Image (tube, rainbow, N blue to C red):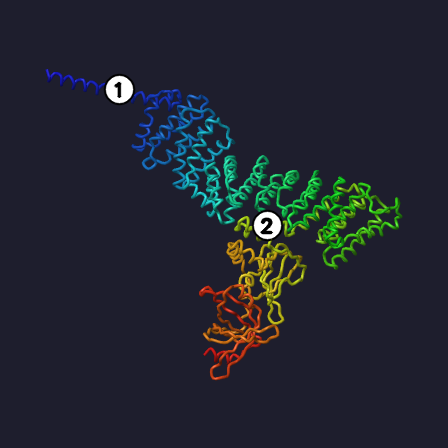
């Protein structure tokens, strides 16, 4: 019985195997039939589950037997169906392609097969408008293959995929919210940190096509890329890199706005906020303005300035109302320039805003109090409110108690404006006749101009008066022969001409006369003011911050404010010597506008070294070291500078010691005087210097050339026919500065002869880092020593 049961089992097993084999043959036959039908154009076979179940194995067999052509032909047929109008048909085609992709291995199979599959899947995603069951799995496959292409440097191949994902994410390619959500997840999944790091590095420092590709990929990687770039920007120390990053982030699209909003809520340093404001301005989207206006009252003036600049960029033609809202919020230093800008724009409510500011004049910052008062007094000349007269009259009375109205610039501006405004409200300072003879008109015009004076030099006043007198004669003639409109047009043209030749005193006098001649010439008045403002746009206050942005970027808010207000403003006319060679003047000169000539003197011959322009600093040597000026600086045109005095600098260091390294580093980057002197051959080394080690006695001289009773020893380090240097220990660096320019007498022993006594002047005292408190003192002899004696000492 046991044997019969075993035989029965074997028979059953053989029967099952025969049935399975038969079924397998039938299945293979059905598959062949289905494939044949599909190849002949019958797409309905895609609805057969048996076909889809066997496709992966079939593709694997094709690859193993090297029949790639058959696989590609099958993919092509499937690709024709991914954009079919029948929803079910395209879903089955995409499912089939997805199943085929899942069994392909790039290392074992032909990469062209995967490339084909990815193309068809992207074609479907671009076409599809309904969320299908395959969306999640296909987007995940696209994500994984996208990461692979980025890792393997296949950036060009990946670029098409990312561009498609970006179009869907940004909404430029319309899709349902469900599809957009899955696509955004795939886009974020591709933005892994190590990929973003490499793309950012190439975007900033790469070249050619690869750099352009990296930029395109970054901007298409969406939200995570925007966040990564913003973090990189906040940590970036290189200005050129920062500017490129500021351009990249907005290009990532709408997702960058959400990232920017997120970061604006954080406690960022001033430069981080400024960079974000720059990005918002680059987007040129007016709806984003509310994001930056809260920073008009930021504690750092540089942030406020960036908001103002961004307003004019976002609203190039209609910025007036927004600038008016900013006026009471920004720092008083910025108000000075902003008042002029609003005045030029001719904003309807501008005068009311200016009058509100005048009412709060007691709160003005002392640094710009008078300048702001003067600007406001000029700008309210178009006011139609009696409030303007009342406020200005009160200010005139207040100023007269402390200043001479004839020379005080504020009083001059206030009284001139009152002279214009009072007739509008029938207010007269003295009785006036109802009529005037034409012959008296010229004298009256001259008298009006005589009431105005300037704080400038007398030469400028006289020139202005001579020019105005000639203009007055012409105005009187026009009024006698033609209309007030003709006279105001003539005054406008003369005002423009004066402004273009930088004669602002004459230009402002003529501009203010326009309304007196023709009360209806408001348009000409505004245009004239705009022209004067345009020509005067090189003023220090308007551009100083942007000129020295590289320096200020390295400072904290408190350091910036302290340094900014420690600077003194100075102006120089053409030909004026700003500082002379040999001067003892430890000051730094920041060139804000104009140009200056850098030169040195050899005997009586001046040697030109360099033309100094806007954005350059001169004086680092005498300022940081203890030395006299080795060059001269002369203004070539109207030149405006800011000056930092050594005393002010030392006061700043007590509160902000970190300023020294920032300022030194910046100056060293632009330090060119020693090199220029060496190139010209004028480095003050007129004779050979010999190294020596010799103890000598020194005596400092008083202003009469007499030696002090006390002498001191010093070790001579080098000696020449025209000077020497010796070492000395000084407890404080500022004490070393007291020796600069002092006369000194030195007793030097000469072998085999009597000692010699030489007199000279200390021209430099330099700190030596190799010893605590050690300085080298450099002396220039009054009279040269014979070379024979020098060689004898050295020998």
Q: Which residue is mark 2?
A: 545
**From where the camera sits, is residue 132 visible?**
yes
Q: Is residue 286 above or below residue 631?
A: above
Looking at the rendered image, the disc whose residue lies closer to the viewer, 2 or 1, is 2
**From where the camera sits, is residue 507 visible?**
no
Q: What crowding class fits label 2: few (fewer than 14 Cα within 10 Å), some (14-19), or many (20 or more)? A: some
Secondary element at tag 1: helix
Task: State which quadrant residue 707 falls in.
Answer: bottom right
Please state, as top left, top right, bottom left or bottom right, where the C terminus lies in the image: bottom left
How far apart marks 2 and 1 lie (CA) works out to 86 Å
Comparing 319 with 41, the one in front is 319
Q: Is residue 513 above or below residue 733?
A: above
Tally of numbered tags: 2
Task: State which quadrant residue 5 falls in.
Answer: top left
Which residue is at a point 58% across and 62% down the rendered structure image?
Answer: 586
Q: Is residue 117 above or below residue 339?
A: above
Comparing 295 with 582, the one in front is 295
The spot of residue 420 in percent (x, y) is 78, 45
The spot of residue 502 in percent (x, y) is 70, 53
Lateral position of residue 416 relative to residue 195, left or right:
right
The spot of residue 491 in percent (x, y) is 78, 48
Which residue is at a point 59% across and 39% down the rendered structure image?
Answer: 293
Lateral position of residue 366 relative to residue 750, left or right:
right
Q: Which residue is mark 1?
A: 23
Secondary element at tag 2: helix
Lateral position of residue 416 relative to residue 575, left or right:
right
């Amino acid at each position: 019985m046991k044997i019969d049961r075993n035989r029965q089992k074997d028979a059953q097993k053989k029967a099952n195997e025969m049935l399975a084999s038969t079924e397998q043959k039938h299945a293979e036959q059905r598959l062949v039939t289905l494939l044949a039908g599909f190849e002949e154009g019958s797409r309905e076979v895609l609805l057969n589950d048996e076909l889809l179940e066997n496709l992966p194995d079939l593709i694997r067999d094709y690859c193993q037997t090297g029949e790639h052509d058959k696989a590609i032909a099958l993919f092509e047929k499937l690709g024709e169906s991914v954009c079919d109008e029948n929803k079910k048909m395209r879903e089955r085609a995409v499912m089939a392609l997805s199943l085929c992709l899942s069994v392909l291995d790039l290392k074992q199979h032909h990469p062209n097969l995967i490339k084909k599959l990815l193309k068809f899947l992207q074609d479907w995603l671009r076409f599809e408008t309904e969320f299908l069951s395959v969306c999640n799995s296909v987007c995940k496959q696209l994500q994984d293959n996208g990461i692979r292409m980025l890792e393997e440097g296949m950036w060009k191949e990946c670029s098409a995929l990312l561009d498609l994902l970006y179009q869907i994410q940004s909404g430029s390619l319309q899709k349902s919210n469900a599809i957009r959500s899955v696509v955004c997840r795939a886009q974020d999944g591709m933005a892994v940190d190590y990929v973003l790091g490499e793309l950012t590095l190439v975007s900033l420092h790469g070249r050619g096509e690869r750099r352009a590709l990296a930029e395109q990929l970054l901007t298409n990687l969406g939200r995570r890329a925007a966040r990564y770039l913003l973090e990189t920007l906040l940590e970036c120390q290189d200005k050129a890199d920062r500017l490129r990053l500021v351009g990249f982030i907005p290009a990532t699209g709408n997702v960058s706005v959400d990232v920017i909003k997120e970061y604006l809520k954080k406690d960022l340093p001033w430069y981080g906020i400024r960079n974000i404001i720059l990005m918002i301005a680059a987007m040129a989207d007016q709806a984003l303005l509310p994001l930056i206006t809260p920073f008009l009252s930021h504690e750092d003036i540089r942030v406020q300035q960036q908001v103002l600049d961004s307003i004019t960029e976002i609203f190039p033609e209609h910025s007036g109302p927004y600038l008016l809202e900013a006026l009471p919020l920004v720092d008083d230093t910025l108000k000075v320039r902003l008042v002029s800008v609003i005045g030029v724009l001719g904003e309807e409510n501008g005068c009311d805003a200016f009058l509100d500011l005048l009412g709060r004049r007691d709160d003005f910052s002392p640094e710009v109090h008078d300048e702001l008062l003067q600007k406001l007094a000029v700008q309210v000349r178009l006011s139609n409110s009696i409030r303007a007269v009342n406020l200005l009259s009160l200010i005139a009375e207040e100023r007269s108690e402390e200043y001479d109205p004839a020379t005080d610039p504020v009083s001059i501006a206030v009284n001139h404006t009152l002279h214009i405004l009072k007739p509008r409200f029938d207010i007269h300072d003295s009785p006036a006749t109802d009529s005037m003879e034409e012959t008296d008109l010229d004298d009256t015009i001259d008298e009006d101009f005589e009431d105005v004076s300037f704080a400038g030099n007398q030469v400028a006043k006289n020139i202005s008066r001579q020019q105005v007198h000639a203009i007055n004669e012409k105005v009187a003639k026009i009024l006698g022969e033609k209309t007030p409109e003709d006279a105001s047009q003539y005054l406008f043209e003369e005002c423009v001409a004066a402004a273009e030749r930088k004669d602002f005193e004459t230009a402002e006098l003529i501009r203010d006369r326009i309304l007196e001649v023709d009360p209806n010439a408001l348009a000409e008045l505004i245009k004239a003011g705009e022209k004067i403002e345009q020509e005067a746009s090189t003023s220090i206050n308007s551009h100083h911050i942007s000129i020295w942005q590289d320096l200020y970027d390295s400072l904290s808010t408190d350091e910036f404010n302290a340094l900014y207000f420690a600077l003194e403003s100075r102006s120089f006319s053409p030909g004026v010597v700003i500082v002379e060679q040999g001067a003892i003047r430890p000051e730094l000169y920041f060139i804000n506008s104009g140009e200056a000539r850098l030169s040195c003197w050899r005997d009586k011959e001046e040697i030109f070294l360099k033309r100094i322009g806007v954005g350059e600093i001169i004086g680092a040597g005498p300022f940081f070291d203890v030395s006299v000026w080795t060059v001269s600086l002369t203004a070539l045109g109207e030149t405006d500078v800011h000056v930092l005095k050594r005393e002010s600098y030392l006061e700043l260091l007590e509160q902000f010691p970190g300023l020294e390294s920032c300022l030194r580093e910046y100056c060293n980057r632009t330090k060119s005087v020693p090199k220029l002197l060496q190139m010209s051959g004028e480095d003050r080394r007129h004779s050979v210097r010999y190294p020596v080690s010799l103890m000598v006695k020194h005596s400092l001289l008083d202003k009469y050339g007499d030696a002090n009773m006390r002498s001191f020893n010093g070790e001579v380090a080098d000696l020449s026919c025209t000077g020497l240097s010796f070492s000395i220990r000084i407890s404080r660096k500022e004490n070393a500065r007291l020796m600069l320019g002092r006369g000194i007498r030195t007793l030097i022993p000469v072998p085999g002869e009597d000692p010699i006594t030489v007199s000279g002047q200390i021209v430099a005292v330099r700190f030596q880092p190799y010893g605590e408190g050690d300085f080298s003192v450099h002396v220039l002899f009054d009279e040269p020593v014979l070379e024979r004696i020098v060689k004898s000492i050295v020998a």
